[in-house]
Image: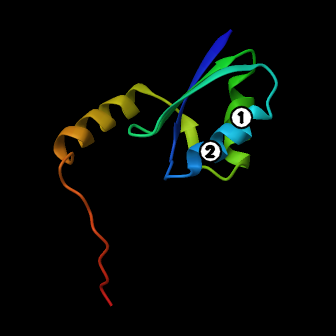
């Protein structure tokens, strides 16, 4: 059994779309989604490139999770945790 960690840009309803894309693959045992850190962990008997390809075909921007993503998320969470952007109209 192999575990694949992906960084997926998700907004709102994208989790449902992500699960639907991955449900079509054979050998997937479990899908864990962490929307706050945009991390997806897929566990099962399938190749990691097939998982990435299925997510991208579903219209989501995805890449393999790396240690650099952990550091960036930790830094952004501390530095910008309370700072929120609102919609601005510059024109």
Q: Label 1: few (<14), some or many (≥20) within 10 Å?
A: many
Visible residue check, residue 53:
no
Quadrant where the image shows the N terminus:
top right
- Look at 65% across and 47% down and name the residue there: 17
Which of these two is toward me, 16 or 56?
Answer: 16
What residue do we see at 65% from left, 13% from top? 2
Residue 18: image x %, image y %? 64, 42
| Residue 85 shows in this picture | yes
User: What residue is pinned by disc 1?
Assistant: 22
> 71 above or below 45?
below
Label 1: which secondary element: helix
Seen from the viewer's position, the closer of residues 64 and 8 is 8
**Above or below 3: residue 89:** below
| Residue linked to disc 2 | 16
Q: Considering the numbered disc 2 on the image, is that residue within a helix, a strand or a loop?
A: helix
11 vs 1, left or right, is left
At horizontal 71% and vertical 41% (from top left) the residue drawn is 20
Lateral position of residue 63 relative to residue 78, left or right: right
CB atoms of marks 1 and 2 within 8 Å: no
Mark 2 surroundings: few (<14), some (14-19) or many (≥20) residues within 10 A: few
Q: x, y percentage for residue 80? A: 20, 48
Q: Is residue 70 above or below residue 91?
A: above
Q: Position of residue 52 (x, y in %)?
A: 67, 35
**Image quadrant assignment for residue 84:** bottom left
Q: Nearer the viewer, mark 1 or mark 2?
A: 2
């Amino acid at each position: 059994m192999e575990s694949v960690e992906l960084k997926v840009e998700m907004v709102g309803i994208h989790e449902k779309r992500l699960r639907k894309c991955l449900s079509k693959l054979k050998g997937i045992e479990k899908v864990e989604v962490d929307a706050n850190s945009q991390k997806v962990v897929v566990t099962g008997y399938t190749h990691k490139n097939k998982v990435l390809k299925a997510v991208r075909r579903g219209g989501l921007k995805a890449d393999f999770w790396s240690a650099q993503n952990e550091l960036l998320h930790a830094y952004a969470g501390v530095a910008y945790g309370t700072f929120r952007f609102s919609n601005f109209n510059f024109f």
